[in-house]
Image (cartoon, rainbow, N blue to C red):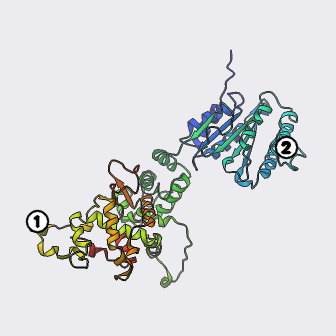
Amino acid sequence: MASIFELPDELIATLSESFPCRDAQIRALVTLLYPRAAPCRNLIIHGTEATGKSTVTARLLEALSSDITESESLLDYAIIKSAECVTARHLFERTVGSVADALQIEGRGAVGRCETLAALTVEMTKLLKYDQPRGNEWRFVLVFDGIDRQREAPPTLLPALARLAEIIPNLTTIFILTAPSPSLLRVSSTPQLYFPPYTKSEYITILSRAPYTPPSLPNTTAQETADLWTRFAAAVHDALAKPAARTLPGLARACAALWPRFTAPVAAGTHRAREFTKLLVASRAYFQDEAVLEPGITLTSTNTTKTTTIADREVRNKATKDLATLLPPTARLLLIAAYLASHNAPRHDQTVFSTWHSGRRRRGGGGLSQRVSKRSKHRKIARKLLGPGAFVLERMVAIYAATRREWVSGEDGEDQANATVDGDVGMAIATLASLRLLVRVGGAGGTGDTMDRGGKWRVGVGWEVIRGVGRSMGVEVEEWLVE
């Protein structure tokens, strides 16, 4: 006896080749949509942005509708994008018009007023239940893409759309959204298909295929270019995936923007394609700052005196978008205090930041150079070049409170009340922690309270950055470091 459960294996293989790393989702979709498999009434497809939900669904439905069996198609579909509908009425009328166009029904393309869910139900019943002379196996798939972001949507929109399949037996409704709630459709046993974010290996697999692969480099073979591209994509993912390229299109744009700069030494003949480490060191500045990925307009001129080099433009962009201009004054002062707490030993705080003995602070360690021991004379590495150490949050706030008046005004004319710790300090600490400029260390990690006085932190910026932040406030940070 022949099985009534069939799957179009050739179609699945074709789609799996077009969409790598989505084989499981494609097979599940075919099973739940193909009329001769196990079609369902309602289906929820969810996942984060740029995971292939809408693209895979559209390509699959297009392939299934073009699969002609016994001189007729077993499936028709219509896709309604909520981003293109400004009101609920617009969504209802767009739905009726799209279904009529998909069924090629004359006279139904021009839709009248359809303002309520009841009117939508009546129109859909006329189109799909009574006006179509199709066979018993024929089904219609109605897709609502981004329905969770529909503007001016009534609270009963999704449950009412899910009930359409109970009135129209040959209808399958698909809801594409980001994160469904447990009682989204208020209907039991609704299958859900999850499109997870791509992993690093999946990103590299996708970027290693057309149309993302670049042309061959000069003086190199196609295989050497492919190997270099694979390692380059992995490096871009590790450096820029979280801050600047969290999705597949963003990562592809980042790779396309950095690839000419990364392979410039290969094109010039100074490096070979196999010398990946040397190429990475030569272009490390591009991986440390995502400013080069920001779009802009580049002016070129034939006159050499007016030509602006890429390095000059990047220096200007970096100068206008560094931390000195992006952070508020309180956050900058706290960042300097955190750097000093990470690189100065706690035993020097009383000498450097206290005014109890002489009424003024003794920068650079004060008189420590006169009492320096013989062992410290052999230190050859500057303190600012060493790695940051952990400090207690209370110590950083104490350094901030002790130095704020001098750093802000440069003189003792400011009121003592303005130097106290207020609510802006807590907000600035939370901002620095969210930007990973301050990193929580210890057993609690990032789960503890941000304002815990005993929590241990470590500064997340280097000397070059902190020197620019300090000079923007008129502070020479080097004077406050104890060598």
Image coordinates for residue 286, horizontal then vertical, percent: 42, 64
Q: The residue tagged with tag 1: helix, strand or loop?
A: helix
* Position of 13 relative to 315 (above/below): above
Q: The residue tagged with tag 2: helix, strand or loop?
A: helix
Q: State the mark number for residue 375.
A: 1
Please state if 348 lies on the left or on the right of 179 as rendered. Answer: left
Q: Say which residue label 2 marks.
A: 119
* Position of 368 relative to 282 (above/below): below
Image coordinates for residue 257, horizontal then vertical, percent: 50, 62
Please state if 359 lies on the left or on the right of 406 as rendered. Answer: left
Image coordinates for residue 115, horizontal then vertical, percent: 83, 49
Name the amino acid, label 1.
Answer: Arg
| Quadrant position of the C terminus in the picture | bottom left
Q: Give whichever of 77, 48 is nearer the camera.
A: 48
Name the amino acid, label 2.
Answer: Ala
Query: Residue at the spot x=30%, y=63% of the render?
Result: 395
Q: Give whichever of 164, 410 is nearer the camera.
A: 410
Residue 466 figure quarter: bottom left
Residue 263 in view (yes/no): no
* Position of 124 relative to 35 (above/below): below
Q: Give whichever of 455, 20 is nearer the camera.
A: 455
Image coordinates for residue 208, horizontal then vertical, percent: 49, 49
Query: Residue at the spot x=86%, y=49% of the render?
Result: 111
Q: Residues within 10 Å of mark 2 (few under 14, many from 20)?
A: some
Please state if 69 lies on the left or on the right of 200 as rendered. Answer: right
Please state if 94 lies on the left or on the right of 480 as rendered. Answer: right
Q: Residues within 10 Å of mark 1 (few under 14, many from 20)?
A: few
